[in-house]
Image: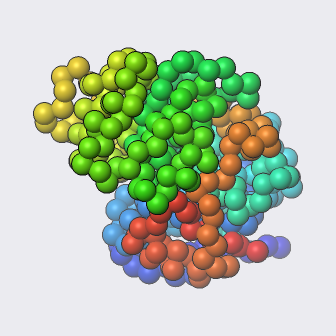
Amino acid sequence: MATNTAAWIKEKCGPFVIEEAAMPEPKANEIVLRSRAVATNPVDAAMYKMGIIIQNFPAIIGCDVAGEVIAVGSSITRFKLGDRILACVDSIAGAGAFQLYCVATEALSAKLPDNVSFTDGCVLPLGLCTAAASMFQKANLGLPLPQIDVKPLGKVLVIWGGSSSVGSSAIQMAKAAGFEVATTCSAYNVDYCKALGADYVFDYTKDSIVDDIVKNLQGKVSAGVFDAIMAADTLVKCAEIAHQLDGKKHLATVLVGPPTPQVVPEGLPEDVTVSYCWGTTIANDEVGAGLWGGWITSALANGALRGMPHAEVVGQGLEALHEACERMAKGVSAKKLVVELP
């Protein structure tokens, strides 16, 4: 009989401790998978280094995983034993992806096509969920969902931070939804963002960044602005871009913690509305159903969606998570740090 092992965090700011964990049992709407690859996110590094968001200790964190289904709950209809999947695991409750066997909900899981490896598949889940909540939920930008048969809509979406994990998913989904995309990144990552499908790419380090974007998009209709970075200065710049462009004057951005009221910075243009998102909330609405229920698998199979940013394998085994989170805390660019679990 298989036994489970996890990378435990036993106290706030404590190190990973690799120890045995209980074998998960799926609830009706859950699946259990044998994790084969996990990816790290900035939120994982923050939980590991600072103990933020974790509700109780000891805890197992981690959101991004790909692996094989080994058990299914009684109401599962889309998966069977042996299926290769990618999933977004909500780790706030302390039972995250950084273990050999983990639980995921059917709502935030999708089959991996044969042409996509576990390593490439695991880079997507949280970034994709976060971008999707901001772009497609009605309370945020409310854009139409991505389609396999793309129909141009004649509008442009501005995405701040296109080379980030969230931004990379946002660009790909926006293109599949029929939008032109204007995005920002460093000069080093311009070609990366263009390869993702961005139509306009701007160097965010330039003092003229707002004017550059507005000037180049004159005459186009904006579908809104998505700030995938969520820093005080980016919010101000994104709001000004939304204010000056024709079209939807709404700025959607990401939360830095669990769903809580966020304070809109003072001095933003009065005609620009601002909303904040939390990625895993799409599990409960039509956005999650539309993406995880079919589009993700089909788009991965035909190349409309790719496992981006590129995976960099830090090591194999749960012990490598220490290095992965330490490196993530220092910051990475246009890459996703992955640990394989053979």
Instruction: Using the rendered image of the protein, determine whether residue 29 is visible from the camera's viewpoint.
Output: no
Task: Please tell me how many numbered marks the rendered image carries.
Answer: 0
**What quarter of the picture does the N terminus occupy?**
bottom right
**What quarter of the picture does the C terminus occupy?**
bottom right
Question: Which residue: 54% across, 18% down?
Answer: 154
Question: Which residue: 42% across, 51% down?
Answer: 185
Is 114 rendered above or below residue 11? Answer: above
Is 88 rendered above or below residue 17? Answer: above
138 sits left or right of 178 in the view = left
Question: Which residue: 21% across, 36% down?
Answer: 264
Of 22 and 50, nearer the camera is 50
Q: Quadrant of residue 250?
A: top left
137 sits left or right of 109 in the view = left
56 sits left or right of 125 in the view = left
229 sits left or right of 264 in the view = right
Of 232 and 105, nearer the camera is 232
Question: Which residue: 83% across, 53% down?
Answer: 115
Instruction: Using the rendered image of the protein, determine whether residue 78 is visible from the camera's viewpoint.
Output: yes
Q: How far from the left and from the top, in percent, is residue 139?
A: 41, 24
Is 15 rendered above or below residue 36? Answer: below
Q: Identify the residue at the far left of this view.
A: 267
Q: How is the protein colored in the picture?
A: rainbow
Q: How far from the left and from the top, in percent, is residue 339?
A: 63, 72
Is 160 rendered above or below residue 240? Answer: below
